[in-house]
Image: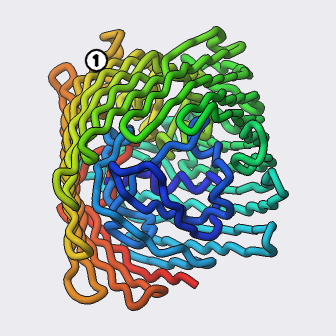
């Protein structure tokens, strides 16, 4: 199964590539690690726009593969939220070079091209450019039928980012552009008569365009009494639907402001507040509800995140809250927790409890990340997580071995689901989106083992008990996982040659006596590092040639091969 929302849609975000530098983390006997910050121009500048208010200390991951593949095994949706990674052996990665090129081609016309270069104009000026193209086209089996459909998806992205360092602040200016062309599946029986006249025959080809520009300032850490960052940007997204029963064309424009201010009380204590504000407006055709046009409403969402944090060698506590206010569509004030407590003992064992929450936009960009084939009828409300409480344990009893166990409960209002049934209207298959109140209790466990560069193995499993607040909407859970299993392995075959395998199994929830086909996906591959600059790789995806619906609501591609090279310079 391809995780499209991660693999082909994340290119819209601006990549902040800069030089690689290593920084030792003090007072970290638990991990005793060296963290290498890839592509970071100035390691003392807090990157407030990739994390929530304050950069979190991330666990180093074992580098199981060296290539930034555009296609790989899907990390299961239930694994998306994992606040504590497994403790692994010490990892020291090599610094990134200034340039990167990748080219790959495979069956189903799979194309994967990417180029990036970081230009240090001077000691204070840096320019980063990136361009990429990813896509495929070919016949796809429709689950439950013998019908084959011609499916096509290509995504192009480009970005430019300029950074200048003053003595105490950093200035940033950048932007990006994306173009997404694809087609919806036309089911059997579709003909000119469906829409009444020959002139109303649907054209299933779609074209989305998105772009953004931003400007920002951030303080160099500890050069001013308060650390701060502020960034303001404009984001636009234009969709062009030409299927007869869809809105013909509409655009979403968003002014996005975010930043934070914080201060150290002493070496262990810190206070601060984060700010995020979105002014969202729409133009063009309205959405459709009950076959009648409905004007999409503009709105503003403001999110504040005040917090207090204390951290020492054994204990880390964060006490905060998410205070969200929205005008117009779904207006009101919402407050949810932002609390975390982590206790480390014996240097290799940790216990944690946390309670999180907050509001998430459901704008065009967010829906496009959920599924590239999304169709929105009535306007969606923002999604509000009342709370997501979780507790867990992790340990590393011996070098290279990591264990974890966690469980929790999450309650979400206006959660977004892909509704397969309503997606088959007029014989054109789309990922129709719906909303409802969801509740899920979950428990999971994992184990990882790594022995030098010779062998890596990871096994993760999770059980989810999904419930809907309104039983009339229970069909929305058809694509949700009940229990999942993921296995990854990588082994050194010969000097410079590694083979790897990824297996994912996901059993869907049974709803009203019906259960969709399980995800059962095996991927194999190999890579050859000729030297530190040159790499050759090949991927064999969906080896079992399974046919099922992905979490995007669309059929998975059949067995396919992708091979290519990458060069660092």
Tell me the residue that label 1 is attached to: 467
Q: Quadrant of the C terminus?
A: bottom right
Circle 1 Cα neighbour tier, 10 Å, few/some/many (<14 / 14–19 / ≥20): some
Q: Position of residue 550 (x, y in %)?
A: 33, 45
Evaluate whether residue 366 shows in this view.
Answer: yes
Q: Position of residue 539 (x, y in %)?
A: 31, 72
| Along the line of sight, the residue nearer the viewer: 348 or 384 | 348
| Along the line of sight, the residue nearer the viewer: 26 or 73 | 26
Using the image, determine if residue 285 lies above or below residue 64: above
Using the image, determine if residue 215 lies above or below residue 89: above
Q: 432 left or right of 481?
A: right
On the image, which quarter does residue 325 sit in? Answer: top right
SS assignment at label 1 = strand
What residue is drawn where x is 54% and y is 74%? Answer: 96
Q: 441 left or right of 368?
A: left
Evaluate whether residue 520 shows in this view.
Answer: no
Q: Position of residue 11 (x, y in %)?
A: 58, 56
What residue is drawn where x is 27% and y is 32%? Answer: 392
On the image, which quarter does residue 17 sit in? Answer: bottom right
What residue is drawn where x is 46% and y is 56%? Answer: 7
What residue is drawn where x is 35% and y is 22%? Answer: 389
| Along the line of sight, the residue nearer the viewer: 13 or 556 | 13
Using the image, determine if residue 336 lies above or below residue 565: above
Residue lying at the far right of the rendered structure:
166
Q: 375 left or right of 261?
A: left
Q: Position of residue 237 (x, y in %)?
A: 69, 43
């Amino acid at each position: 199964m391809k995780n499209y929302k991660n693999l082909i849609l994340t290119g819209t975000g601006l990549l902040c590539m800069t030089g690689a530098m290593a920084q030792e983390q003090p007072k970290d006997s638990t991990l005793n690690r060296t963290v290498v910050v890839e592509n970071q121009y100035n390691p003392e500048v807090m990157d407030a726009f990739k994390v929530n208010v304050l950069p979190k200390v991330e666990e180093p991951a074992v580098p199981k593969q060296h290539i930034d593949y555009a296609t790989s095994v899907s990390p299961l949706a239930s694994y998306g939220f994992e606040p504590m990674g497994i403790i692994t052996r010490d990892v020291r990665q090599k610094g990134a070079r200034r340039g990167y090129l990748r080219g790959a081609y495979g069956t189903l016309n799979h194309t994967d091209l990417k180029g990036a270069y970081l230009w240090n104009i001077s000691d204070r000026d840096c320019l980063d450019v990136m361009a990429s193209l990813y896509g495929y086209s070919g016949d796809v089996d429709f689950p439950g039928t013998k019908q084959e459909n011609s499916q096509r998806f290509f995504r192009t992205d480009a970005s430019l980012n300029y950074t200048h360092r003053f003595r105490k602040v950093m200035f940033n200016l950048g932007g990006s552009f994306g173009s997404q062309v694809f087609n919806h599946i036309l089911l059997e029986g579709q003909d000119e008569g469906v829409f009444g006249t020959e002139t109303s025959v649907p054209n299933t080809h779609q074209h989305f365009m998105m772009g953004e520009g931003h400007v920002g300032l951030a303080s160099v850490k500890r050069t001013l009494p308060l650390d701060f960052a502020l960034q303001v940007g404009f984001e636009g997204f234009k969709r062009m639907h030409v299927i007869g029963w869809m809105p013909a064309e509409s655009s979403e424009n968003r002014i996005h402001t975010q930043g934070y201010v914080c201060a150290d009380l002493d070496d262990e204590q810190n206070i601060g507040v984060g700010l995020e504000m979105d002014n969202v407006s729409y133009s063009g055709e309205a959405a459709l509800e009950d076959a009648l046009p409905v004007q999409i409403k503009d709105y503003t969402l403001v999110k504040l995140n005040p917090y207090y944090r204390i951290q020492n060698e054994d204990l880390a506590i964060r006490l905060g809250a998410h205070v969200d206010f929205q005008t117009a569509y779904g207006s009101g004030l919402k407050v949810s927790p932002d609390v975390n407590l982590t206790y480390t003992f014996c240097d290799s064992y940790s216990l944690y409890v946390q309670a999180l929450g907050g509001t998430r936009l459901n704008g065009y960009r967010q829906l496009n990340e959920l599924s590239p084939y999304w169709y929105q009828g009535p306007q969606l409300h923002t999604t509000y997580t009342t709370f997501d409480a979780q507790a867990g344990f992790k340990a590393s009893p011996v070098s290279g071995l990591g264990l974890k166990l966690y469980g929790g409960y999450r309650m979400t209002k206006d959660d977004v689901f892909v509704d397969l049934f309503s997606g088959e209207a007029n014989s054109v298959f789309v990922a129709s989106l719906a909303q409802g109140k969801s509740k899920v209790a979950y428990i999971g466990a994992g184990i990882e083992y790594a022995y030098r560069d010779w062998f890596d193995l990871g096994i993760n499993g999770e059980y989810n008990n999904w419930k809907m607040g309104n039983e009339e909407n229970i069909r929305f859970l058809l694509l949700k996982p009940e229990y999942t299993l993921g296995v990854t392995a990588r082994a050194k075959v010969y000097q410079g040659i590694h083979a790897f395998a990824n297996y994912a199994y996901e059993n869907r929830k049974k709803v009203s006596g019906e259960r969709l086909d399980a995800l059962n996906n095996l991927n194999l591959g190999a890579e050859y590092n000729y030297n530190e600059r040159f790499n050759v790789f090949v991927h064999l995806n969906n080896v079992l040639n399974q046919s099922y619906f992905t979490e995007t609501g669309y059929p998975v591609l059949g067995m396919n091969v992708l091979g290519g090279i990458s060069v660092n310079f």
